Image (cartoon, grey):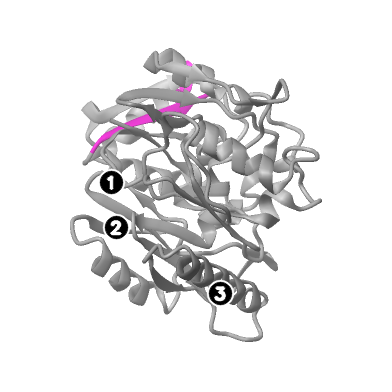
């Protein structure tokens, strides 16, 4: 939680800054949603349809046959076809928040930042996912930055951190520093602080402690804390004292409040209630309203057929006055242990 000097000119734009497009991949890996896969394409169609009305959408598919099939399906949804671009690019999974490159700015120039990917140190099949940057580079022709430490590529996923576009970043110790699901062996807190500073221009880092129950990434921050403006943070909150998340989320709130006070940042912290604990086939899934996606004129909000859906919708309406809030039912999508933010990656203008 130290202040760092900005070592260079790289900056990661915040999600609410003007976007050129959104990147996502068409679902094909049935093992990510065992027993529910047939319900998943419709969720993606809804996401693509809504995004196509406000900006370009780049969709990755595995082969030419899938382009023909998907084009036919999309036409039936009344999506804005002129805003859709379909690319052949094999993927293992669809979680482009973690597998697609992160877009940075160097002055006004766009840079593709290619972090390495090891499937959250959990799965063995990630060969295609680790090469998605090649497809993006091929279709955008931006300069490529490959961050390294001691000559070795750095493993990092987009869901592990969130930025406010003004040099502040938020992440969790559980994801980056625990002995479980190790991304970069022997990395310490100071190593990550150096990396975020050097490659993303970050000079203030807020280290929260733990993520939520059911999260198979071991503590991604995009389920628990998100910037929605340079000075406003949405933070997941659990009121049920018996729930596993109660203590951890309360602890995160305390950490953030102290950091805010100590650094005199004047951040406004907004509590976003958690939905009721959700189980699919008796397994807890990481249902959270914080896994939303901010696009140019809209915010895609995950909902879970929960009593709190409407309450959260109204909170979002209050804080996103210049964007339309669009609820997307993620009751089935979350069986893959990710929601809307996990499947999207923004490309800034």
x%, y% of residue 152? 72, 23
Identify residue for label 2: 326
In magenta stretch: residue 247: no
Magenta-drawn segment:
55-67
Q: Nearer the viewer, residue 125 or 13?
A: 13
Q: Residue at x 55, y 25 (%)?
A: 114
Query: Disc 2, disc 1: CB below 8 Å?
Result: yes
Identify residue for label 3: 254
In magenta stretch: residue 61: yes
Q: Residue at x 31, y 54 (%)?
A: 299
For the residues labelled 2 and 1, the Cα–Cα distance comes to 8 Å
For the residues labelled 3 and 1, the Cα–Cα distance comes to 36 Å
Judged left or right of residue 26, residue 228 is: left
Query: Disc 3, disc 2: CB below 8 Å?
Result: no
**Residue at disc 3, secondary structure:** helix
Q: Nearer the viewer, residue 339 or 191?
A: 191
Identify residue for label 1: 50
């Amino acid at each position: 939680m130290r202040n760092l000097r900005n070592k260079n000119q790289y900056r990661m734009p915040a999600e609410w800054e003007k976007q050129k497009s959104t990147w996502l991949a068409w679902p094909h890996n049935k093992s990510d949603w065992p027993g529910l896969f047939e319900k998943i394409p419709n969720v993606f169609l809804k996401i693509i349809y809504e995004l196509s009305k406000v900006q370009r959408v780049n969709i990755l598919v595995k082969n030419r046959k899938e382009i023909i099939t998907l084009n036919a399906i999309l036409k039936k949804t009344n999506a804005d076809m002129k805003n859709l671009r379909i690319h052949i690019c094999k993927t293992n999974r669809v979680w482009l928040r973690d597998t697609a490159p992160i877009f940075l700015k160097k002055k006004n120039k766009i840079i593709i930042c290619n972090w390495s990917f090891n499937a959250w140190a959990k799965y063995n099949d990630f060969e295609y996912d680790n090469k998605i940057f090649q497809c993006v580079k091929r279709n955008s022709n931006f300069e490529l930055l490959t961050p390294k430490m001691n000559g070795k590529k750095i493993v990092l996923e987009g869901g592990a951190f969130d930025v406010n576009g003004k040099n502040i970043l938020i992440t969790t110790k559980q994801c980056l520093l625990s002995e479980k699901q190790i991304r970069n062996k022997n990395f310490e807190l100071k190593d990550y602080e150096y990396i975020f500073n050097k490659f993303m221009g970050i000079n203030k880092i807020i280290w929260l402690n733990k993520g939520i129950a059911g999260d198979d990434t071991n503590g991604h921050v995009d389920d628990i804390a998100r910037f929605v403006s340079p000075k406003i943070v949405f933070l997941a909150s659990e009121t049920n004292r018996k729930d596993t998340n109660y203590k951890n989320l309360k602890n995160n709130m305390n950490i953030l409040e102290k950091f805010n006070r100590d650094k005199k940042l004047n951040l406004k912290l907004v509590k976003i209630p958690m939905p009721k604990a959700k189980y699919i086939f008796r397994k807890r899934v990481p249902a959270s309203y914080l896994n939303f996606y901010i696009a140019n004129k809209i915010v895609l909000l995950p909902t879970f057929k929960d009593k709190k859906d409407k309450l959260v919708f109204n909170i979002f309406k209050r804080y996103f006055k210049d964007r339309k809030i669009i609820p997307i039912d993620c009751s089935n999508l979350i069986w893959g242990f990710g929601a809307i933010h996990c499947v999207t990656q923004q490309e800034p203008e």
